[in-house]
Amino acid sequence: MTVLKNKIDFAAIVCVNRANANGDPLNGNRPRTDYNGFGEMSDVCIKRKIRNRMQDLGQAVFVQSEDRCDDGFGSLSERAAAVLKGEKNRDVYAKTACETWLDVRAFGQVFAFKDAKGMSVGVRGPVSIHQAVSISPVEIESLQITKSVNGEKSEKGSNRTSDTMGMKHFVRFGVYLVKGSINVQLAEKTGFSYEDAQIVKECLRTLFVNDASSARPDGSMEVVRLYWWEHNCKDGQYSSAAVHRSITITPKDPSRMPECLSDYEIALAPLEGLKPEILDGV
């Protein structure tokens, strides 16, 4: 494995077309928005999709969703206990976890389980992901839907019908910007390598592969472009904020609601000595 020597920044432009980018369970699963109407995707949501892609690429992942479980363990504590086998040395515990699971050495993890007898181990990961926000306010539509079958058998003499009412919410159209960075100093501590960084890059480029659902039909969400900056030193030639600001996405006609990506002007300001790799998404 090649040691990661240089800081990395990245940004992905995501298009959402009649899909629920990230539902809010506290608001009827409506797509998340801020008080000004801009769409949001939480960093937790984005990391979940990256972890899923890591699994698709054959990598061992610690935080697995129930429907994606590939090792037979029903909880995080079971998975940790099977690998770490009651290890009491915190440094050895963290080192073994990082060597075993890619998402731990990438994002970090807090290990605090009942069977650990009060021991808690925290790992800080080098890969940080920002909350993604839409470039323009998004328009949310809601559909009344029905289920034309009974979930349970109706009692004799009951007037209950088979139709069950429900709601489905989606973003009509939105362009979101996903931003993040990889810190070399933290990568040295977790053993996160240059090869690991390339896996994260591929996960971002293919973020919505195998992610289809009724809320996100295939093709309704896509990464249209990924920017990947590899600096020439540990601390970076520029701050992450300056790098991320070098991308500007503005509506061509501010007087109307954008309906497709071509309604935006995408510009990349040059940074002396730092040129990004630009990849098309899937």
Image (cartoon, rainbow, N blue to C red):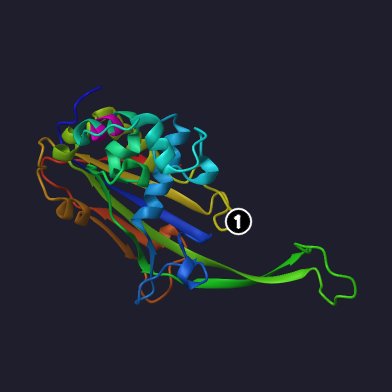
Q: What residue lies at 28% left-to-right and 55% top-to-bottom?
A: 130
- Write down the region rendered in magenta: 93-97
Residue 222: x and y in percent read 46, 50
Q: What residue lies at 40% left-to-right and 70% top-to-bottom?
A: 33
Secondary element at image label 1: loop
Q: Amino acid at mark 1?
A: Ser
Magenta-span inclusion, residue 94: yes
Q: Is residue 208 above or below residue 15?
A: above
Q: Which residue is mark 1?
A: 214
Q: What residue lies at 41% left-to-right and 63% top-to-bottom?
A: 263
169 sits to left or right of 4: right
Residue 41: x and y in percent read 39, 60
Residue 274: x and y in percent read 15, 41
Res 32 seen here? yes
Magenta-span inclusion, residue 198: no
- In this rendered view, identify the residue nearer to me: 242 or 70: 70
36 sits to left or right of 270: right
Q: Is residue 134 above or below residue 203?
A: below
- Which residue in the rendered view is the most extreme toward the top? 1
Total marks placed:
1
